[in-house]
């Protein structure tokens, strides 16, 4: 009976992982629609504030991506550390984790490169548009204050990327938390069964 419940939980969590991927795609598409609208406005009349707007508009999308990635990592860690050990036949998260540790070419530089490739595959369109807007803002005749706003926007974008990088590096922390929680729950269950006897 317990295994059936765990399988249902596994199915629901896998569905949630798919939903996370879909929402990331919708975030990119929404940002592209915003960029298209601003570009149409920009073609009718020039104002540097539209570039500033696009730079700052990327921030909520970057933060949202980071938070969705954090949810994805928590779910995958939970599946790996709590569900898979209790259900025979499940083991994808455990298998992929072990494979990543022994995969050929996984030297430190390769891991760093893979890490940033993944980040850019998630958010590359944001940084491409932000850098383009910043370049256009800096190279046009605009006031110092407007250029300063662009610099602040770039700094905030870099901070958002640092946060996303930190989130993506935190999967081991979640695995440790779930491992400790599982051991604590198991210990309590053993104590309760000992008390009943």
Image (cartoon, rainbow, N blue to C red):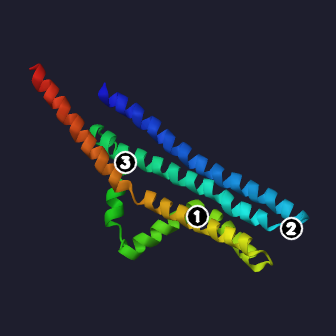
Residue occupying the point 85% across, 60% down:
40
Relative to residue 36, is residue 112 depicted above or below?
below
Q: Indicate the secondary structure of the residue bearing disc 1.
A: helix
Structural distance between the alpha carbons of marks 1 and 3 = 29 Å
Q: Indicate the secondary structure of the residue bearing disc 2.
A: loop
Q: Indicate the secondary structure of the residue bearing disc 3.
A: helix
Q: Is residue 88 left or right of residue 23?
A: left
Structural distance between the alpha carbons of marks 2 and 1 = 24 Å
- Residue 73 position in % (x across, y down): 43, 50
| Nearer the observer, 33 or 110 | 33
Between discs 2 and 1, the one toward the N terminus? 2
Between discs 1 and 3, the one toward the N terminus? 3
Residue occupying the point 72% across, 64% down:
52
Q: Which residue is identified by label 2?
A: 46
Structural distance between the alpha carbons of marks 3 and 2 = 49 Å
For this orientation, the residue located farthest to the top is 196
Relative to residue 133, is residue 17 depicted above or below?
above
| Nearer the observer, 115 or 5 | 115
Q: Which residue is identified by label 1?
A: 156
Q: Which residue is identified by label 3?
A: 77
Q: Is residue 49 left or right of residue 158?
A: right
Q: Nearer the viewer, mark 3 or mark 2?
A: 2
Q: Is residue 89 visible?
A: no
Circle 3 residues within 10 Å: few <14, some 14–19, many ≥20: many
Q: Is residue 117 visible?
A: yes
| Nearer the observer, 133 or 12 | 133
Q: How many callouts does the rendering have?
A: 3
Residue occupying the point 41% across, 47% down:
74
Q: Is residue 158 left or right of residue 101?
A: right
């Amino acid at each position: 009976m317990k295994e059936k419940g765990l399988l249902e939980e596994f199915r629901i969590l896998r569905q949630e992982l798919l939903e996370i991927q879909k929402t990331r795609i919708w975030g990119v598409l929404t940002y592209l629609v915003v960029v298209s609208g601003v570009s149409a406005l920009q073609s009718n009349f020039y104002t540097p504030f539209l570039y500033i707007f696009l730079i700052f508009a990327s921030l909520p999308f970057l933060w949202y991506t980071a938070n969705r990635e954090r949810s994805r990592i928590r779910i995958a860690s939970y599946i790996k550390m709590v569900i898979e050990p209790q259900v025979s036949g499940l083991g994808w998260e455990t298998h992929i984790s072990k494979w990543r540790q022994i995969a050929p070419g996984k030297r430190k530089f390769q891991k760093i490169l893979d890490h940033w490739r993944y980040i850019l595959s998630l958010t590359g369109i944001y940084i491409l548009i932000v850098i383009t807007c910043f370049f256009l803002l800096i190279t046009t005749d605009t006031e110092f204050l407007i250029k300063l706003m662009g610099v602040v926007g770039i700094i905030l974008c870099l901070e958002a990327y640092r946060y996303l990088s930190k989130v993506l590096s935190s999967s081991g922390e979640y695995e440790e938390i779930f491992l400790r929680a599982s051991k604590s729950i198991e210990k309590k269950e053993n104590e309760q069964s000992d008390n009943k006897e």
